[in-house]
Image (cartoon, grey):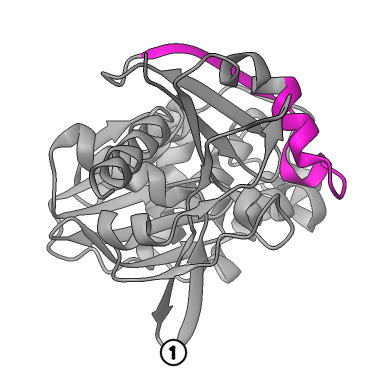
Amino acid sequence: MSRLLAVDWGSTALRGALLDEEGRVLDQRAAARGMLSVGPGGFADVFEATFGDWMDVPGTRCLMAGMVGSKQGWVEAPYCACPAGLDEIVRALVAVPHESGGRPRAIGLVPGLSCESHGLPDVMRGEEVKVIGALAALGLRDAVLVLPGTHSKWATVAGGRIESFSTVMSGEFYALLSKHSILAKSLPPGEVPFDAGAFDRGVGTALDGASLMQTAFSVRTLALFERLGEAARASYLSGLVIGEELRCRPLAGAREVVLVAAPALVERFERALARRGIAVRTLGEEAAWQGLRAIDRAARASR
């Protein structure tokens, strides 16, 4: 029996899926044990507590991606420079020296990717496996992909290789504006339902207007003059931020974007991209499992 434990170990969360030889998900686990919560020398213990019983089954190997491979992680997997595809990533895989009960564990780490954009370095760690998984799932070799989140990643793929990418701190800017700026006083406390109309208004304002440095203040002024209800303001601000992300993207001529995200973000980015006349193909977070499986298969074939 041959099984792959695919692990996405990020800064704040630990997720894993057990895959059979055909890539079917047999089981999944998640824990709030991201890299930031693990003390020095504690990664092996967390891994065993979370996945040890799965790894005890003969024929089970593990491939991990994410911040677990950073300098502050379990073992460093240095960045692999773009352009990079399966061949380059496989050559840069790093083995994790770990054993349990006197038996070595077969654990590998996927490297992050780096690139240069306008003379500045950029990096991703964990998103690359989702890109590879999306390409495999959709049968694509050329695509533009967006992976929205705290730090959105936009990647351009040509011939099956990630040519370049860029990071947009949209999610973090939304958090800062909504919690730590003057705008926080205009927003309702706690979570409120998504308001599609207010969101669309925010996207339109961002796409048609000046930069977010200017348009963001409209959250306060629309509230001040009672031209936007309190419950709608968070969605409006979200539209401003995501609209700004799209406004700054060189998407002229693009007809389709592959979107890899959780359902809530999928809806918002689909609506925003539609304002620019761009079709969307979507995948969920399971793209990480398929990406790790594709890398594992390529690594085994290269031996």
State whether residue 265 is above or below residue 166.
above
Q: Which residues are magenta?
A: 25-49
State whether residue 271 is above or below residue 153.
above
Q: Quadrant of the N terminus?
A: top left
From the top left corner, tell me how far across and down residue 79 is, in percent. Answer: 50, 67
Q: Is residue 29 magenta?
A: yes
Label 1 belongs to which residue? 119
State the residue at coordinates (43%, 44%): 201
User: Mark 1, residues whose alpha carbon is within 10 Å: few (<14), some, or many (≥20)?
Assistant: few
Q: Quadrant of residue 103?
A: top right
Q: Residue furthest front?
A: 102
Which residue type does callout 1 highlight? Gly
State whether residue 197 is above or below residue 112.
above
State the residue at coordinates (72%, 38%): 34
State whether residue 18 is above or below residue 173.
above
Q: Residue furthest right?
A: 39
